[in-house]
Amino acid sequence: MVIDKLNIDTNDKEMLAAEEQRKITANRIKSVLSKKHKVIKIIANEQIGENLRKNKLDIVFNLSTGLRGESRQSQIPAILEMLGIPYIGSGILAHGLALNKAVAKKLFRFHDIATAYFQEFYTGNEPLDPNLKFPAIVKPACEGSGFGIHKDSLVFDTKSLYKQVSKTLAKYKPPALAEEYIEGREFTVGIIGNEKEKIILPILEIDFRNVSEEYDRFNTFESKNGLGGSKQLYCPAILSTEKKTNIEKSASMAFDALRCRDFARVDIRVKNNIPYVIEINSLPGLMPGYSDFPKMAEAAGMTYEKLILTILETALKRERSKKIQRSKSYEAKVSMAYELLKEKQKQQEEIV
Ligand SMILES: Nc1ncnc2c1ncn2[C@@H]1O[C@H](COP(=O)(O)OP(=O)(O)OP(=O)(O)O)[C@@H](O)[C@H]1O
Ligand SMILES: [Mg+2]
C-alpha cells in the first residue's frame, strides 16, 4: 500500500486532524489485508519510484493524496501506471477531475447532472456574476476533508462574499468557488464497483435539523471533527423508493462522468426533489468508526474487513477484464495483419 508521509512539523489543525485519520486508516487496512496477503507500506515521497520498483508488487492499495500541486491526487496513480503496476481505486484522470470541484461541476453540467450554480474566483477582483443567488457558500475548489469550510463560509451579501473569497485565496490555491447554497436535505452515497456492476451502499443522511444556528447547518470542518452543532447521521436514510432511486442515479452518473473507479463517495443535497451533486470524493475517507464510507458499509451488513476485501476484489476484477480486453484486441490486430498480408500475397500472385 502507498500512504502519505506524516507531516509532523505542521501546527495547522486541519492538517493535523487529517494526518491522524490517515495513520489510523492505513494501519487498519494493512492489518485486514495482512490476514490473506503479504502487505508492505510504501511512503509517497520523492523516492517512491525506486521503492516501488525494487519490491515486486502485484497490486497497490493507493491511499495517497499526493505530494503537492494542483492535481496532486493523481501523482501516485501516474507513477504506478508509468511503472506498469496495477492499483486499487480511481486513476489519474478521475482524481485530477474530482479534486477540482469547478472542473467536476462543469462535467456534471455536460452530463445533465444537477449541481449548484457557481462562480470561480482567481484573484478576488472578478465582478460578481449577477446570476449567482444568495445565500452562497464560499469554498476552496481544490481541497477536501472540510478544509476551508467554516461557519463564515456561508454568506448572505456581496461584501461578505468578497471577504470570504479573499480569505480563501489567501490560504488555498485558486480558484475559490462561490456556489449557490442548496437549502435541503444532505446525503452522501458510497459506491463500490465499475460501470454496470456497481454496489450502491445504503445512503447516509446528515441531518442538520436539530442544529440551532443557521450558520452551522452544513458540514463545516468543525462539524466534521465533532466540534459543530448536534447534527445527526441516519444510515440508511429514510427515503421513498422514488427519491432513493433518483439520488442513486445522480450519484452513479457523477461517478461515471468523472470516470471514477472501484470506489468513491458522492455528496448530494436535495432541493425541490432535485438531487444536486455537491462533489465527488474519488479517494473517500476509510477510517473505521469515523468516515462515512465504512458507516455505510456497516449499514449494508459489511464488516470493515469485508469492505476492504470487496474493494480489493473489485479492482482485481477490473484489472483482469482489462487484460482480457487487451489480449482480445491484440489477437484481433494480429489476425487483421495476417489477413492483410494474405490479401497482398494473393494480389501479387495475380499480377505475376
Ligand atoms: N452548494 C452547496 N449548497 C449547500 N451546502 C453546501 C454546498 N457546497 C458545500 N456545502 C456544504 O459544505 C459541506 C462541505 O462541502 P464539500 O463537500 O464541497 O467539501 P469537502 O471539503 O470536499 O468535503 P469532504 O469532507 O466530503 O471531502 C457539504 O457537505 C455541505 O454541507
Ligand atoms: Mg464533501
Image (cartoon, rainbow, N blue to C red):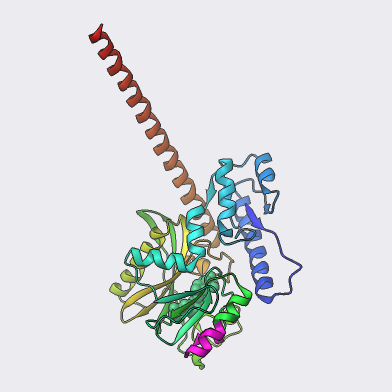
Q: Residue at x 44, y 78 (%)?
A: 179
Q: Is residue 301 visible?
A: no
Main SS, magenta residues: helix
The residue segment tinted magenta is: 152-164
Give residue 279's position: percent from left, percent from top.
Answer: 46, 69
Residue 63 vs residue 65, the one in the foreground = 65
For image coordinates 59% across by 52% down, the residue present is 76
Outermost residue, right side: 9
Quarter of the image holding residue 5? bottom right
Toward the viewer: 219 or 73? 73
* Residue 155 painted magenta: yes
Q: Is residue 117 visible?
A: yes
- Percent across and percent down for residue 307 are 51, 59
Q: Which residue is pictured at 60% across the width and 55% down the height?
A: 32
Q: Is residue 166 left or right of residue 214?
A: right
The spot of residue 158 in percent (x, y) is 48, 88
Q: Is residue 169 magenta?
A: no
Where is the C terminus found, in terms of image quarters?
top left
Instruction: Specify the farthest residue to the left.
Output: 350
152 above or below 328?
A: below
Q: Is residue 329 above or below residue 196?
A: above
Q: Which is more toward the observer, 302 or 196?
A: 196
Q: Is residue 169 above or below residue 160?
A: above
